[in-house]
Every structure is written in C-alpha cells, then in structure tokens.
Amino acid sequence: MGKRALFGFIYAGGLIGILGFTPYGTYMLAFFTLLLLNEVARILDVQSRLPLLTFTSLFLIGGAIGNWGGPEEIISATLAIGIMMVLALLRAERPAHEMRRGLFALAYVFLPMALIIQTTRDFSELILFIFTMIWASDTFAYLAGRSFGKRPFAPKLSPKKTIEGFAGGVVGTIITGFAVNHYWDLLDVDVALALAAVVSITAPFGDLVASSLKREADVKDSGVFLPGHGGALDRLDSFLTAAPIAILIYQYMI
C-alpha cells in the first residue's frame, strides 16, 4: 500500500505540474497515447503491433511539428493511419484479425487522445480539471461503496462496484467540481457543474470498458507503467472515455 501511495502521489504531482505549470502537456499525452496503443493492442492479441505504433508515432511527431492542427487533422490522421496499417497487414498471418483489432485500438485510443491533445494545446487547465474530477469520482465512489454499497453495478465486469458507490461518486464529484472551480475561477459555474456531472457519470464506464477487454484477455493489469498501479490503461481507462465527452460538452456550452 505504501509503494502504491508513493507512486500515486508522484503520478498525480507530475500531471499537475506538467499540465498546470508547463507547456509540455501535449508531449506527455502523446507519449501516453503510444503506451496506451501498445497495451491495448497487446491485450487484443494484435501480433503486428509495429505498423500501428510506427505510423501513429510518425503522425504524432508531425502533429507536434505542426502545432497539432485542428478537427480536420484528427480525421485525416486517423484515416491515414488506418489505411496504411491495413495495407501493411495484408500479408499478416491473420490479416482480418489484425486489421479488425488494430482499427479498434486506433478508434479507442488515438482518436480520443488526438482530441485531448489538441485541447491541451489550447487549454491545458481544462484537462487538469477533468483529471481532478476523475480522481474525485474514484475517491467518492470508493468511500460511498465501502460505506453503503449493497447492489452491484456491473457484477460480471467489476464485482466491487455498486450502485450506491456510483451515486456517491456523482454527488461527490459535482460538489468537488463546484469547490475547485470556485477557488480556481476556471470556468463559468454552469459549465463546471456540467463537466463534473458528465465526468462522474462517464468515468466509471471507461473503467468497465477496459475491464471487459482485460477480462476477455484474462489479464489483471494492462502493463507495468506505474509500480503498484499497473499499466497506462489501468491509470487512464476512465480518462479515455470521460475526457473526450467532457471536451465536446465544453465546446458545445461555450
């Protein structure tokens, strides 16, 4: 528990420091993108991971050089990586299997992370706010579930999650969002509360999606990204789902 807590504080402190006080958040998230792609492809049993990682790396480098582009570049890059990967996998031992699962990894990881990276370029504090809401959701869901949890939320995928914990996570995150935004003065109150609510609802489903992938692959952790915490997907599964939706809600509301 001590090792897990130590590295958890280091991880959280690193995210806060880089996103809140430096211009390097985009590069950190680009690195996370490659870690996530590699882990998801491994979990999905994609044997030909090299084309996926190579083409994605090239486009991430191009994105960094070109200041990450805009929405059109996200679509264009995703299509280009997908087409090049399909062509590269035509001679694979199991081409249909490799293409199908590789394209899923691309849609599951690269597409949302590209949107997140672009938003980080323009408004890194928003990404930090989303991370804070995810941490609040996890904390309050755990506390409420441990104190009041009786009814399973998704018994086959995550037996310890309860409906009471989910409800406690929603309420606690909204309260935290109001308090954090009040002292940080980052967003309009209605926007902050909306984002807190969206994150609190969607974050647990991101965890369940990753759990379903790992359960099918019969693995406990996605990797060894952070000692005591598992892989990058274990740390960012909720973020992959909650952050893109929160960003889209933010863009709609402003």
Image (cartoon, grey):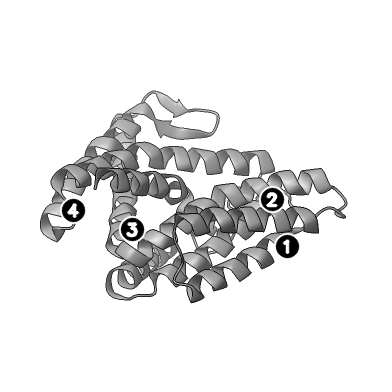
Residue 111, image x, y percentages: 53, 52
Name the secondary structure under disc 4: loop
Residue 62, image x, y percentages: 55, 72
Q: Residue at x 43, y 28 (%)?
A: 153
Q: CA distance from mark 1 to mark 3?
A: 29 Å
On the question of residue 224 being in view, the answer is no
Q: CA distance from mark 4 to mark 3?
A: 12 Å
Q: Is residue 78 left or right of residue 124?
A: right
Which mark, by number, is residue 51?
1
User: Mark 2 near mark 4, Cβ–Cβ under 8 Å?
Assistant: no
The residue carrying mark 4 is 187
Among numbered discs 4 and 3, the one appearing first in the sequence: 3
User: Mark 4 near mark 3, Cβ–Cβ under 8 Å?
Assistant: no
User: Mark 2 near mark 1, Cβ–Cβ under 8 Å?
Assistant: yes
Please state which amino acid type lies under the numbered disc 2: Gly
Q: Quadrant of residue 140?
A: top left
Q: Residues within 10 Å of mark 3 (few under 14, many from 20)?
A: many
Please state which amino acid type lies under the numbered disc 3: Ile
The residue carrying mark 2 is 102
Q: Is residue 215 left or right of residue 251?
A: right
Name the secondary structure under disc 2: helix
180 and 60: which is toward the camera:
60
Q: Residue at x 48, y 49 (%)?
A: 237
Name the secondary structure under disc 3: helix
Residue 136, image x, y percentages: 29, 48
The residue carrying mark 3 is 127
Q: Is residue 15 left or right of residue 89?
A: left
Residue 66, image x, y percentages: 48, 73
